[in-house]
Image (cartoon, rainbow, N blue to C red):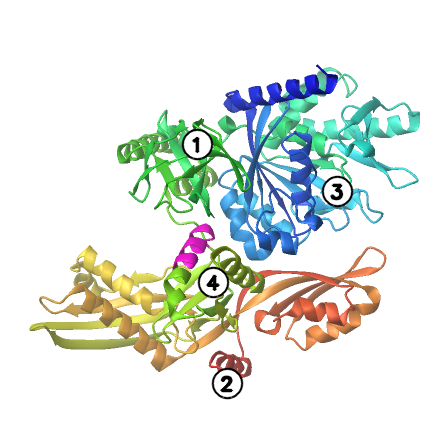
Amino acid sequence: MSLFRAIRLELCKNLTNIHRRCFSTKDIRNIGILAHIDAGKTTTTERMLFYSGKTRSLGEVHRGNTVTDYLTQERERGITICSSAVTFHWKDKKINLLDTPGHIDFTMEVEQSLYAVDGVVVVLDGTAGVEAQTMTVWSQAEKHRLPKISFVNKMDRPDADFDKCLIDLETKLDAKPISLQYPLKDSKGNLSIYDIIRLEHITWNAQSLGRVYESKPVTDENTLLELQDKRNALIDQLSGIDDNLADFVISNDGFDKVTNDLIYTALRQATCHQKVVPVMLGSAYKNVGVQPLMDAVIQYLPHPNERNQLYDCFEDDFVGKVFKIVHDKQRGPLTLVRILRGDLKKSMRLTSTRGQSEVVGKMYEPLADEYREIQAAQAGDVALCSGLKHTVTGDLLVTSTTSLKNAQKRLQKSLEKKTDVMANNVDDGDDEVHADLINEIFSLEPQIPDAVYFCSIEPPSSAYQNAMELALKQLQREDPSLRVSFDAVTGQTVLGGMGELHMDIIKSRILTEYKIEVDLGPLQIAYKETIENPAKTTLTMEKEIAGSKQSVTITLELVKDKKDIFSLDKSPENTNNLLAIRPRTLQVIRKGCISALERGPKVGGQVVETQIKLHNITIGRGTADSFIMAAAAQCIQKILTENGTRLLEPIMSIQIVVPNERTSGILADLGRRRATINDVMPKGDKNKLILVNAPLAELSNYSSILRTISSGTASMTMQPYGFTVMNTNDEETAIRRAQGFE
């Protein structure tokens, strides 16, 4: 037998053993990769798959052959659109990794993914530092209380600045970064890394595509002294957080006797408790620094047992969180489930928190759009399931309704005990955090961001109407940020989305995946409306329907309020009347009122920052609920029509990087777009960073316009900033545009 064949057989045997091995929960890491667009998330993921032996060749974004960017649109555009899950093994550990989009239009993909992970790797562009979308994904990770590691990528480039990235993490994100490495570039620009804890120099072999690397102790005295100073500073930072490390430093009169293991233990504890952010560096494209990053994921990020303790209320019963749904042509809808407690097995019968009964068909280990069938998955793992027909993103899957009720009872008891303890040690902050986590466990609806654009969608002919509706239903189940509604006034199907790119991708996917050449109407701005002054009216409706007299007299008032949407008038003259209303009838009234706020009188925008106050209602005997609901809705519409509303337009926050000599032209153009220039700052020696807030209505196709003005030298990022009231002239222009007169 040849040596090559023997090695190959041994490798195959080892891989088979790895696949067959049942990993302990402590050997599993569920991580997400987050970053601003084009920071290098997908390239870093590809290197991880390659070095772990999961793939045999390096995928490149610019070549369109990456594993995680498998959609046609992703490969054509070179961006990540849908988050994708991959599983690989590194040093006898199992890593489930979610590669997420960096574009603001697909921020919902990031939000969904964070329900499934226990920690995140935040990738920074070493030449740009913390950027706009970095701050967005960081705040999302903070909301989910996820430990973080930062990887400063592209450090091979001449303009990369590692120290500036550390400052950005501290000042812009209010983090406490701890640098574990330091870069070194030789005269040819080749990047290598100093390990600050181990005082070693790590180099990568370019001919092996980075698979071969070696660590050697630093021998140069000046360099060694500098690294020792950095190591001591690192220990000093950690000793201010970790009591055990502080005691050791004090008892040994200094840092010299602090071992690497003590540092690793303190660093892991501090990272898992979100007190520090370890910072690694490298260049994924040049195959430098990825293996130490994978080591850091295993060493510093928590395993599943260290997170989600609130799910202990399910004890040994199965519970899983649905965090994504994808549609496969052969297998149908596939549901990605993070298993929180218990084991998930093929053909298992489950119940969703919506009360729907489901049966698991086949199960797969995720590798983007490739699937390896498995029979079961354990707590802490991630699995793909086929056959779940009714489950949607955000659902909890449990073994039975009884299991869910028992878990709620156990959780309630533990909370009561906690409340008793807190009564003696008042800590309102902990109470609020606990309440948020409980809502997260049993809440059904994911928090979906507001659409900023909408447009009509039409099939090429009426024969394709049903096929188009099915395609939209599947895409909406996969992407909750896509809004699909039917406009009864125009008879059109209306799409709402997060941006121009989002809408363009939806159209492209319907064509490539469903073979339907749909037509999208012109993009319309998703204006909102609000009342200017409080207004009150009384409406009486009487009608005979099928021989039964229907009668309602209702008094409602609209007032400015950003919090509560519906309330009752608690004045003495109305209290008795309102207390006599049955709770079911009150819900009907509330539903009718709120539905009327969905379309304002000016451009059909949602009416916001408005509270409905019920003063009085008289309902005739035998009046149907539907008639009561209609009366409440018509009363609200009457108030809005008679008293009018003001338009609120969406504002975008823009960051523009432009060469110094092109700055004046871009500022002049922004001035014509009703933009507010917040700051103009130097970015390196040759560029300026312009921070702007501008109305979305003035930014149609602005990225192309910006490239034209700057001769292709400027770049921009944009994200929603909120809504603001329009002045009268701009409002009239917006109304004419919405009505098709401009």
Query: What amino acid type should be assigned to the residue bearing mark 4?
Result: Ile
In the rendered image, residue 242, in percent from the top left (x then y), is placed at 64, 26
Give the residue furthest to the left: 547
- Considering only order in the chain, which callout, 2 or 4, is on the residue closer to the N terminus? 4
- How far apart are labels 1 and 3 at the CA level? 35 Å
> Which residue is the site of mark 1?
340
Q: How crowded is mark 1: few (under 14 residues within 10 Å), some or many (20 or more)?
A: many
Q: Name the residue under label 3.
A: 285
User: From the image, which quarter does the N terminus lie in?
Assistant: top right
Residue type, label 2: Phe
Could you give the CA–CA distance between mark 2 and mark 3, rounded to whole angstroms?
50 Å
Label 2 CA crowd tier, 10 Å (few <14, some 14–19, many 20+): few
Q: Main secondary structure of the magenta part?
A: helix
Numbered disc in front, either 2 or 3 = 3
Discs 2, 1 touching: Cβ within 8 Å? no
Q: Is residue 575 left or right of residue 656?
A: left
Nearest-to-viewer mark from 1 and 3: 3
Q: What element carries label 4?
A: loop
Residue with the mark numbered 4: 516
Relative placement, left or right, of 644 versus 721 is: left
Dot 2 falls on a residue whose secondary structure is: loop
Q: Which residue is drawn at 63% across and 50% down?
A: 135
Q: How far apart are marks 4 and 2 (CA)?
A: 30 Å
